[in-house]
Each structure stands twice: as C-alpha cells, then as structure tokens.
Image (cartoon, coloured by chain):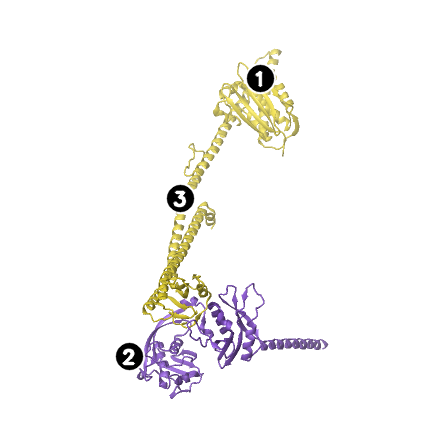
Amino acid sequence: MKKIVLWICVAVLLLGAAGTGIFLFLGHEEDETGYQLFYLNADEDELVPWDGLAEESDPSALVAELYLLQQTLPEKQKGEEVKLLLPKDVILMNFSIDGEALLLNFSSGYADMTREREILVRAGMVRLFSQIPGVKKIQFMIEDEPLKDSDGTELGFMSARRFVENSGKEINSYIKTSMTLYFADKEGKMLVPEERNVYYNSNVPLEKVVVEQLVKGPKESEHMTTLPPEMNILSVTIQDDICYVNLDDSFKNLLELTGNTLKTELAVYSIVNSLASVCQVNKIQISINGKTNEQVGTTEIDGLLSPRSDLIREEE
Amino acid sequence: MKGKAKFFRSLRFCIMVIMTLMSITAAVVVESTIVRSYEDRAVNQRTIIVKNQSDMICNQLAQEGYLENQENPVIDSEIRMLTSMYGGRIMLIDKNYRIVRDTYDLDTGNYQISKEVLQCFRGNEYSRYDRKNKYIEMTVAISNPESPTHEIIGVMLISVSTVEINNSRQVLQQKGSLILAITVVLILLFGFILSGILVNPFQKITKLLDNVKDGYPEEKLSVTDYLETERITDAFNDVLDRIRTLDESRQEFVSNVSHELKTPLASMKVLADVLNMQEDVPVEQYREFMQDISQEIDRENSIITDLLSLVKMDKKSQDLNIDTVNINDLLGLVLKRLTPIAAKANVELILESFKPINAEVDQTKLTLAFSNLVENAIKYNNPEGGWVRISLNEDNKYFYVTVADSGIGIPEDAQNHIFERFYRVDKSHSREIGGTGLGLAITRSAIVMHRGAIKVHSVEGEGTTFSVRIPLLHNV
C-alpha cells in the first residue's frame, strides 16, 4: 500500500515537470517566429539566406524589427563569410504600410550604390519584407522620390516573385503547347479566339496554365483583356470531367478595369470557353473564394457552366 | 559431381576464367569510355555551337538596340530559331537586371539576380553542363562591338536541354550493352575452345606417361608444343634414362655379384675336391691348398663386407659417429695401409698437406671413402707404374682433398656413371683388377652423408683427379 502511494507521488511529480516543460516550449514558440534574413556572400554576387527570429506580430513593428535584425551580422557559422546587405550610408529613414503595400523610404546613399549592389539590396529587401503577413508588394523611395531605373522609369511596386534566379534546372520539365484562348474583341461585345504557344512547367496542371494565360491578357493589340491582372487563382482542378475554378474576389473588380464597356458574361465565358477548348471539358464550375452562388456584374455563375459558342465571333 | 569439382581446379578452367575476366573488363572499360566520351564531345559541341550563335545574335541585338526596344522581327525570329532548334530557353537581361525577353514568356519583366548573371556583368561569362538535370547553361555578355569601351549592356542567359544527347547516349549504351553481351558469349565460347587447345599438350604428356606405366618404351617422350612441356618431357626422359641405367647396372650387379661370389666358391670347391680325391696327400700340399682356400674366403669376405657397408650407407642412416678428427692423421693412416699394395703395383704415393686440419667427421666412414679413392688410383694406374698424389687443403668453411693419379683415366661418357652402384667402366678388365664395383658408390655416399661433394676430372690415358669438399663443422 505504501509502495503504491509512493509511485503515485513520483508519477505526479514527473507529470508536473513535463507539463511545465511543455508550457515553456509553447511560450517560446508564441513569442518568436522564424524569418529569413538576407546577407551578401563574400564575392558580393549572391544573396545568402539566414534564419532569424523576430518577436513582433504587428506588421509595422515587425518591419522595424526585421530591418534591425538585418543590420547586424549573424554569429559566424560553418565558416561561411557573409556581409551586411545594406552599405553603411544607406539607411531606411521611414516606411509606411498601406493595406498590402509597403513603402520603404531610403536615404540618398541608396542612389550611390552600384547597379549590381542595388539589385541585390532590392531583391533582398523585397524578399525580407514579403515574409510579413499581409505585405504583398513593396515600393522603394529615395528621400521621398520613387526609385527609377536607368531609363528613368518608375519601378513601382514589386513582389518577391519578380526576382528570379536560375531556372535552368527545370528546363526539361517545361512543355510547349499551343492553345486557343478567348479574349474580348475591341468593343467588348464578343469573344475572339487567340492562338498562342505557351511554355509551362509540367508540374503545373494545364487547366491552371490556361487561366494564368488568360490573366496575363491578350498578345494581339486588337483584343481586350477579360480578367483583372491582379486576380489571384486559388485553384483550378479537373475531376470527373468537371473543371473547378476557384478565384479570389478581385474577379469581381473587372468592371472598374474595363470602364464598364465589357459585358460581364464575356469574362466568365472567356474562362469557360478557353478551358473547354484546351482541356476538353464541357462542365465548368467557377467559385469566388470558395463560394459557388456568386454573381459577377449581371451574370450568375451559380452551378455548372457549359461553353457558349454564340458568344464567339470568328475572326475574318 | 567429383568430375565437376575437378574441372574447376583444372588449368583449363583457370585459363578460361582469366581470359573471360580480362576481355570482359577490357570491353566494359572500352564501352563506358566510348559512351562517356561521346557524351562529353556532344555536349562540348553543342556548347560551342550555341555559344557561337548566341555571340552572333548578341552582337546583332546590341547594334540594333534590341534591349531597349524589342519590336524587331528579325532578331525575334533568330532567337526563336535558336531556342526551337536546341530545345532551349533564352533570357535577355538589360543593364537594370530586368528580363526584357524570355522565350518561355514566364519571367518577362522580372529581375534576374542569379550569381552567374551578376558575374557576367562583371565580365565573367560562364557555361556549365549539369549532367543530373540534363541541361547546359551559359551566359553571354552583350556589348556593342562598335562602342569603344565595350561596356556590357546586357546579358543573355541560355539554358539548353541535353535530353536528346542523353537519349542518344542511352541508345549508344544499349547498343554497347548488346554488343557486350554478344562479346561475352563469344569470349566464353572461344575461351572454352582455346583453353582446350592450350592445355592439349599437357593432356598429351599425361597420355604418354600412361603408356610408360605399362612398361618402359624404347622411344623417348617428346611434346615440343611449349618450352615448358619440352622441359617436362626432357626431365622425365632423364629420369627414365637413370632408371634404365640403374636397372641395367642392377642386373649386371646381380650377375657380377653372383659371379664374384661363385668364383671363390668354385676355387674352394676345386681345391677341396682335389684333396678329397687323392688318397695320400702330403701335408705340404694340404697346407698349400688350405692357404689358397683361406685366401678365397678372405676374398668372399671382402665382397660381402663391401656390400654390407654400401647397404648401410644407402639406408641414409643418420647414425654418423661425429668426432673432431685430424684429417692429416686420417689420410696418413689410409696411405700407410695401402703402401704395400702400392709398392706391389710400383706406384708412388705422395701426400701434400699444408697445415694441420681438424674437422668434425665420422672417422670410420671417411677412412673408407678415402681408402677407396686411393685404392682405385693405385689399381687403375699405369701397368708400368706411376704416382698418386693426395693433397689436403682448407678454407674457413671446408676442407678439400684431391686424389690425382697418372692412371689410365676414365672415358668421358662413363664419367657420369662411375658413382653409380655396380657400374664398371671396363667390364673386360674387371675380373683381372678385382673389386666389386661398389667402391666409388660407397665413397660418394659417405661424402654426401657429411654434406660434402665429390667431383671427377679425367683425361683418358693421362690420369684422373677426384676432388672432395667436406664442411669443417658438422651441423645437424
């Protein structure tokens, strides 16, 4: 009897200790989140990502914290020599967050960097701050003036996707295909076919490539885009001969884009007809943020849609 | 089952395995080298061609200002042609690191910040073949050839797929493997046949030896296919010759010995019979005849003694009675014992010794050996008389004894046989000179038992010299 009591005591103690441990662990996780910081390698020709931890969760505070973290060299590891990304005389003077956009205002030293250094700084900064939840695009300013390239064009907003490194590795997974896409005609009254050759990664399903190409817009100047370029494709999948297209709600903004000239059903049916022609499916369901009973302008997109040839005008 | 195991141990199997292994190794090495070098060459060539074309296009587009304005159908089509021809992707990057043209149209307008592009702007063009991912990647710097500064105004980044080269490599490899397989089968076949041919002479030898087993054939064995087999058969012939000689001399010995043993017996029988048949034999005659009989008994005795001592030596008995013996004394004693015979034959005995020599030897056996040598030298000396010179010398390991005579000599063809038992050089004189034909055999056995050596040098009609070498210390 005594023994059992003793054992229970030990078990309670052990459980207590473990519990405290778990709480400590969780607390630690809650406080700090892992982010990637970016440094330069010794040759100054490559960005070196480095794991860092930041505590803040408020976007503005996080920008400041990440910037400060970025300005200190990491403890030496694995003998890899890295350098600070920003030169000494380049300082982030202030910044502002406006919805998805982050505006970075640098000191005048930014303009004195070599083009090579500048592009690495820019890529590093964009990649760094894109990790902040909610921040999708970043604009650079020098002393409140927008950053321009050597031709004098404003660079505008940039996202992390805009900076690419070598993609040669995947060259053999790219497939070339020719497809017929449907865009609106000049007047926005009818759909017109446009043939194009597309290279796409075989890891991406063809149906998604079709919608992506539609978002990119027409190549021929006579044709008019049917979808807003900032629209996000959430998913495109084919199952049992039905194509499910899930878009975000920027799909609804297309009326502003076209200045009300475009019949909204053309937007819907440019997707439907293109998918039908390229992927050989006859039933398409479009949902917005997962909801299927939405309305775009005056067009109901409820239920399964079939391609409509009456909207197509054959080009002469 | 046993036959199989035997085959695996055979020389033929070894040869087969070696041949097969060697040729397969060679074939595999050759095949993989060829395939590999094909790949290297094809990739190199592809790299050079693409590089040349790209250089041309780069010059052209720099002159036309294509980086600023891409509305140029000529250059467009050239770029398209290059990419479609080699299954590649071309990106044109302007000095703001912006991709102004991407033949895949995936990254147009984006920024290229890869290390290779940055390095290319610094003037370091590069090209690399990635075998794992099957592509060649290279950067070409774009600068206006007409501008004096050659400033780099852009970079062309080219990735070319090598799947096609890989495919041909695989086809080549498959063909190679097929040829390899055929070669292996052929090699096995040839190996089997060839190894059979190679070991054939050995089988011939076995067959011939089998014949020999049934009796000694008169003709000699001869398998001259290889130097090795020739040596084997030669050696075997020598052995066979020796056996034959031995056999012959043994037969001769049997007849000799029986003859020798019979002769004294016959004499004794005659003497005894004469005495028995006469009725009143005077005592003088009795005494005379009995003396003769006694002599014959002595003779019989000496023959038997010789035979016994030889048999003892032949047993290779290690029971040598080793003592430190003064060789000078030993030889002196031998000569003293033989002096009466020498005087009778009118032969002068000369002993030349330079210093006292002590050696660890078996006195009895060595005395017998040297006695035989000297006795022979006396017996086979000139009938008119002559000399025997015995000389003794040593170095720090051996002592040397030479017994030279002025005798009748030994014919050259007999010199090899004189140490054999029962061998007689001149059979016609044997009876007259006496002896058993065992003397030299005994001598040689005694010397060999002392780990020594004996050699003979003789010129017919001039004389014979026996040289003996025996170690000073007897190491067991």
Query: Which x, y percent locates residue A205?
Result: 40, 74
- In whole angstroms, how far apart are the C-alphas of marks 2 and 3? 85 Å
Query: Which x, y percent locates residue B361?
Result: 63, 28
Query: Which x, y percent locates residue B375?
Result: 57, 20
| Residue under numbered circle 3 | B197
**Residue A232 found in image quarter:** bottom left
Answer with mark 3 or mark 1, whichever residue precedes in sequence: 3
Amino acid carrying label 2: it is: Glu
| Residue under numbered circle 2 | A315
- In whole angstroms, how far apart are the C-alphas of marks 3 and 1? 74 Å
Which of the two residues, A181 or B149, is positioned nearer the viewer here?
B149
Amino acid carrying label 1: it is: Ala
Q: Is residue B123 above or below residue B373?
A: below
Q: Secondary structure at mark 3?
A: helix
Q: Which chain is yellow?
A: B
Are discs 3 and 1 both within one chain?
yes
**Residue A266 found in image quarter:** bottom left
Which of the two residues, B107 or B229, is positioned nearer the viewer here?
B107
Figure colour of chain A:
purple
| Residue under numbered circle 1 | B272
Q: Secondary structure at mark 2?
A: loop
